[in-house]
Image (cartoon, rainbow, N blue to C red):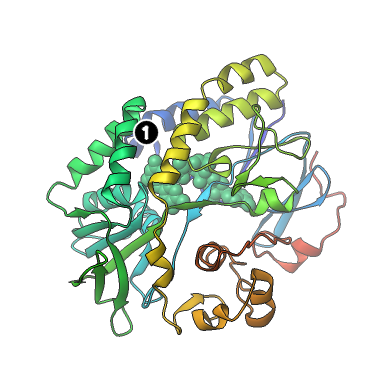
Amino acid sequence: MRVCLVDDNATLGGQIWRGLQANSARNHPLGRYFLHWTERLKRTRCDIFTGWQAIGQPAPHLLRIERAGEFQDLRFHKLILATGARERFLPFPGWTLPGVIGAGGLQAFVKAGLDAQGKRVVVAGTGPLLLAVAAGLRDAGVSMIGVYEQAPLSQLLRFGFTLARHPGKLAEGIRYRRKLGGVPYRTSCWVVRAEGCGQIERVVVTDGHREWTHDCDWLACGFHLVPNLELPRLLGCNIADGYVAVDSLQQTSVVDIACVGELTGIGGIEKAMLEGEIAGWAAAGDKVKALASARKLKRLHEFAQRLERAFALRDELRALPAADTVVCRCEDVPHAALSECGSWREAKLHTRCGMGPCQGRICGSAAEYLFGWKCSGVRPPVYPAEASAIAARVDSSESG
Ligand SMILES: Cc1cc2nc3c(=O)[nH]c(=O)nc-3n(C[C@H](O)[C@H](O)[C@H](O)COP(=O)(O)OP(=O)(O)OC[C@H]3O[C@@H](n4cnc5c(N)ncnc54)[C@H](O)[C@@H]3O)c2cc1C
């Protein structure tokens, strides 16, 4: 089949293999898979568009992609969406200070070459990503002060016992803990505020009973992951329980559109790769191979569900923002203004919450958690794009 791969990153590989090259992959824990797949890809005649973002569907079976004002319309028979996930951020006093950075965001900066040597870092929030980030930052030479996980130990232990069925993940967890030897890892703890004059200088942490302070240069903070549902939503795919609903061949409710990876459940690379394989076979019309691979998925779906339960957010986090804590950073909307609204729509109309350049990607998931709203509206373009690319009619520039 004629295959085309679009990724808005400058290089292929998604979140996990971000920035890897053939030589650096040799030292990466999952590097051999990266080498295997990049070699396989090289042998195909796949058209690759890196640095391009999919922004919408101007007509059925036509995906519009954009890069710095240039655009192309890609006509497809089958579309497989794998837009991944992003971190969830929850607001607390001081979270907008420079130096308070998403845990995965800081990881990405460091992978891209940011000098972290000697920086004093606190890692906080929830999810397995915290350990991966803390271990990576330690490799990069930071002075790691502590890792604070909001989930209770009992929940994590229950989760840990089930990892016997996932030896690869267990080994990964042990590897991270080893790298963090001597660094305090505390459960049932969370940051209540960040303080500093124009820049983070310290964080205040609590275990729900008492508070204490750490001086630091960076706070790497994130509350697990949320799927990037904007594109599937725009294309009309049904969403169930927060993820794209798919059948055993990864097919969505929209004919000829499949979804894989974090879009169907936050479950990590193994699940994402297997679902990609299933959707690939199915798109190529080989149902037998697709179903054979699909049989291996059950275990990975169970893992995703356990992950979600283990790192469920505690109620106390809803009480963190003060009246003047900004929730929507694009439009500077404080918590007090949102508390007067009854829904996401009302909040958008009255306060402009979620109407800025990020289009609610950050404040939307926070508002869902803080107020219990459904923040589901999405309009084209799914990313900010040049007006010419948004307004252009479907014409002869479309690719076959
Ligand atoms: C910040 C962050 C850090 C992570 N770090 C780790 C880690 O260290 N270890 C670990 O095991 N797991 C990590 N994960 C989890 C990891 O992302 C997944 O397990 C795995 O990468 C899922 O694969 P995927 O294909 O679903 O998504 P991804 O690997 O995220 O790939 C999705 C790709 O789609 C691109 N994209 C999204 N929207 C568009 C669009 N509209 N147009 C064009 N391209 C688009 C993205 O830029 C990305 O390159 C991390 C997740 C996040 C969000």
Give the image location of residue 161, x and y in percent.
30, 33
| 355 or 120, nearer to the observer | 355
- Which residue occupies the foreground of this view, 75 or 319? 319
- Residue drawn at the location 82% of the way across and 61% of the way down: 392
Check the picture and name the quadrant holding the N terminus. top right
- Whether residue 27 is visible to the viewer of this picture, yes or no, is no
Q: Is residue 243 above or below residue 332?
A: above
Q: What percent of the width, then of the height, locates residue 204?
A: 25, 73
Judged left or right of residue 130, residue 7 is: right
- Relative to residue 224, is residue 231 drawn left or right? right
| Residue at disc 1, secondary structure | helix
| Vertical relation: 305 (above or below) 184 | above
Front one among 336 and 69: 336
Disc 1 crowd, CA 10 A, few/some/many (<14, 14-19, 20+): some
Q: Residue at x 45, y 45 (%)?
A: 308
Indicate left or right for 190 with 9 as reference: left
- Where residue 317 sits, quadrant-wise, is bottom left
Q: Which residue is mark 1?
A: 31
Res 209 seen here: yes
Give the quadrant of residue 194.
bottom left
Give the position of the C terminus as an image quadrant.
top right
Residue drawn at the location 47% of the way across and 30% of the way down: 300
Please, what is the three-letter code of the amino acid marked with disc 1? Answer: Gly
- Is 131 located above or below residue 2 in the figure? below
Residue 311: x and y in percent read 39, 49
Q: Is residue 64 left or right of residue 97?
A: right
Choose between 317 and 382: the one closer to the eye.
317
